[in-house]
Image: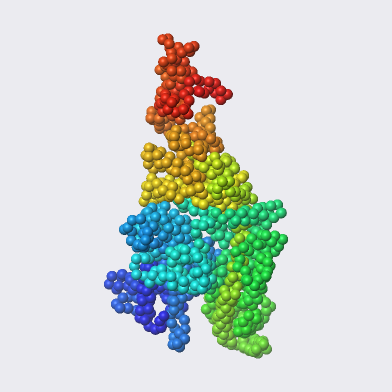
Amino acid sequence: MSDVTSSANIMDDYLKITKEYEEKYGENTILMMQVGAFYEVYGLKNIETNEIIGSKIVEFIQICQLNIADKKLIYKGFQVLMAGVRDYSLEKYIKLMINAGYTVVIFSQEDDEVKKNKKKRVLQGVYSSGSFISYDTDVSPQMSNNTVCIWLELYSPMRKHSGIGSNNKNIIYGASVINTFTGKSSLIEYEVPFIMNPTTFDELERFITSYPPSELLFLSPFDEKINQQIKQFIGVNCKTVHDISTNNTNEIVTNCSTQTYIHHILSKFFGEDSYNVCSEFNNNIIATQSFCYLLHFLQEHNTNLIRNISIPGFNTAGNRMVLANHTLKQLNIIDDNSNDNWHISKKLTSVLSFLNKCCTSMGSRQFSAQLLNPTTNEGWLNTEYEMTELLLDNEHNHFVDLCRKELVKLRDMEKICRQIVMRRIYPSTLYYLADAVKIIKQLNTCFHELPILVDYLCKEITFSNSSDKSPYEYIDTTCEEFLKYMNKMFLLEKCKSQTSIHQFDENIIQPGVSEPLDRKIAEYTEKIQIFHHVRNHLNKVMGGDADKEYIKIHDTEKSGMSLQITKVRGENLKKLIKDIVDKNSPNKQISIKLTTASFECCLSDIKFSTANSNTYDIDIPILNKLCKDLLYHKDQITSLILYVYNDIIETLDKEWFQQIENIAKYAIRLDILQCKSYLAKTYHYCRPKISIHESSKKSFVVAKQLRHCLIEQLLRNEIYEPNDVSLGLDETDGILLYGTNAVGKTSIIRALGISIIMAQSGIFVPCSEFIYCPYHSIFTRILGNDNLFKGLSTFAVEMSELRIILKMANENSLILGDELCSGTETESALSIFVTGIMELHEKQSSFIFATHFHEILGYDEIQNLKKLSINHMSVLYDKEKDALIYDRKLKSGSGIRTYGLEVCKSLYLESSFLEKAYSIRNKYFPETRGEMEMKTTRYNAKKIRGMCELCKNELSEEVHHLQPQQLADKNGFIGTFHKNHVANLLAVCEKCHLLVHKNPTDDHTKKVPTRRKKTTDGYTVC
């Protein structure tokens, strides 16, 4: 703080404080210092070079579109520059600077109690992206305002390292978040072997996706290059990032790593026993260090930011499904922010945006948290299913429409709670808070006959130990008492339009709340009456009724009240006054008797002065003095209203915060429940049923008539084709899915993943029946190039993700893949793919892989996998139209083997190009030729050498005689038929031919085919 003295002293203070806060928060920091009624920013200009130093004043005026002025002051040889804004518009410019990524430090003036008649400047607050709460936060479209702290530590097996030069190291990342809009917080800690690739940071990436930061604190032992790469891996894109090295001597970092300080700060905010009672703090020490650093950071900005915040939730792996390899983006649960969806409605760009049909901002926020953090908690899931079903039955389904009609009127009560704590709330917001409480009370009354529903809605509410009320009674009574208090304190209808606390057009405080305010309003009202009496008297002089608007009362903020008349009528009034005065009429005297005083004014004292080209001001001595009194009274009334208002806000904070928060929790649960019921009812979703595997706790899923919730909404020219999918039961753990391009392989894979995430978020699913045992983890490999921007090749991305899958997958995992190994040559791709399938099969994981690798179907390794199913998405060929018809049904087998060029036909590629492509395909892949292009055998021109008649996978290379040639006589006959009879010839591949000629004693399980016989299913060899 500093005395407000000379301009030089102001510059000393300004430059010193600016330097202090730039060192603390970085170079993008601006200081706004109050001088009188203005908040000012200063800079220094080199007189010779015009270079401006000392602050970010140039950036400030550019962002805020303000002018810069030269002050009449030279400071240490520099010209002083200044830009400023009025005190009542400060918030507007704070917002502009914050949106540009700046931290804004505000120093305000206040009276110095020690040095009388002096002012001092004190820190009013530090504002940044993650810590700013405005007066209109409750109506802001921004759902959350997350400040996130990430703390990275590198460990060797026995000791901690701060470098990256040793081997066999693990990285532990602890992260914490506080949403300053709601006061809710969350922690996560994860340990993995330190390999510098994206999959190492999967869980951290999911945390950032779930809680996108407005501001990030990044504590790390690494250098800037590695830090930047990690931030790319986890998808950080916020404007305000603070990089803090844990290698350098930093008192705050050191203290946050010390148990004494950790215990102190947690005890201060959550109670003396919080550190010991919440074992998660002890078990997740790096996350706890991160949380303590975050608390300190926000406390330095504004202590109110962390008052009344909730104890953090811990994102431990216990009941939470692990979503690895960017699952949320790869399944389109969240928008991947690509430009591919520019033509699609915003509501259909992601599963979250489509499913989130909540009517309130606070409900939408919590629904999003549930969908992005699916659970394995079967008790919670079954409760969600049961309550959703309750609102769907015929007796209660009208409640869904009722809730949607009423809840849409609610403001964000969680935000309003924080605005109360921060003392940054307009009277209009209090009106809407009271209105929201009234709506909740009415809805609660509607549920009077459904105690099971009210109990569910009150599940997260904190009840007083002494309370013996039922949940229904608690909500009803709490709402009633709160509304009674608000109506006792405020004139709520007048609050509705009051969106300022600097100026009050009307009194908003109920009579009887403040005796000084009531007295001052009475005095002000009486003085106002004098203006009306004088105006009415002059209207009578004009010959009209007192109510006629010949003379108007003109009121301005700066000059106060005055009487005005048009110049034409003014000239007429002058003559009338002169006549009255000349005749000495009794009307020449204006007498006013009020409750506390009497006033008299002679008409001869009235003067006229020009207000503008068309209007006179009527100057009356008694009114001129009265005008100054009214301005003084008005300022006093404004100050008193603000004083009483702030006092009531403090009472709301101290005595009503918990009750308002409880009502908000009730509203949130109701909003989410109606959303889930609305989805099920509107889109014909079914209730998931949780079942346990007969022999183990192995995860599985059986989905009947499975649909993709987004694609079925996007389709206009065809109806979505549902399919049945079963994984994890006795017969099938995995599926290899074949099919033409664009037939829907990826769609059905995504549909399954989406439905499982929906089910494990407590939401009904787009199926006719859905039975499952919850999965503990989902791994996806669907996007082929999603990490290219992170500096890795497609193959490197695939292998790093495959490494994580093979390392972490188990019987409770679901793996969804599309085109794995597309980034390397065929031989390696086939080998890696088959080995991966074998590994997952052995782990008994559930998996589906879309693939075009038909070659592997003949591999022994694949044929020996008993729980691997081969399926394809069917396509029909219409000969008449020469077109592929996408049937999109999931069927057994691999389907037709070649189709790429056929699909190209439908995409209108040039015919000359297609002819060349067909020619090359036939040359190098003869097995793809049409039947008319197959060669005949030299043994018999009638025998066409096509696909192998034994394995049916490979093109035949040789011809085998079922009855050996050595049995033929000199004429070539074997008994009654010629050895080269078509029926005695078998087209085979080399591998099958060798097996046929293998010595039967070597393998007693193989029977050598010797004859062709007819069956009801055609001819076969046996």
Position in image of residue 192 (x %, y %) = 41, 56
- 312 left or right of 451 in image: left
Q: Nearer the viewer, residue 174 or 653?
A: 174
- 97 left or right of 435 in image: left
Task: Identify the colour scheme used.
Answer: rainbow
| The N terminus: image quadrant | bottom left
Camera sees residue 939: yes
Q: Nearer the viewer, residue 632 or 764?
A: 764
Looking at this rendering, what residue extends furthest in the left direction? 48
Q: Nearer the viewer, residue 561 or 574?
A: 561
Residue at x-position 44% and y-position 79%: 122
- In the image, residue 766 sits, relative to residue 526, either above or below, namely above
Residue at x-position 43% and y-position 13%: 968
Residue at x-position 49% and y-position 73%: 268
- 548 left or right of 253 in image: right
Position in image of residue 793 (x %, y %) = 37, 47
Residue at x-position 46% and y-position 37%: 862
Looking at this rendering, what residue extends furthest in the top direction? 971
- In the image, residue 312 sits, relative to residue 933, either above or below, namely below
Position in image of residue 703 (x %, y %) = 58, 44
Where on the picture, by quarter, is residue 379?
Answer: bottom right
Position in image of residue 270 (x %, y %) = 52, 71
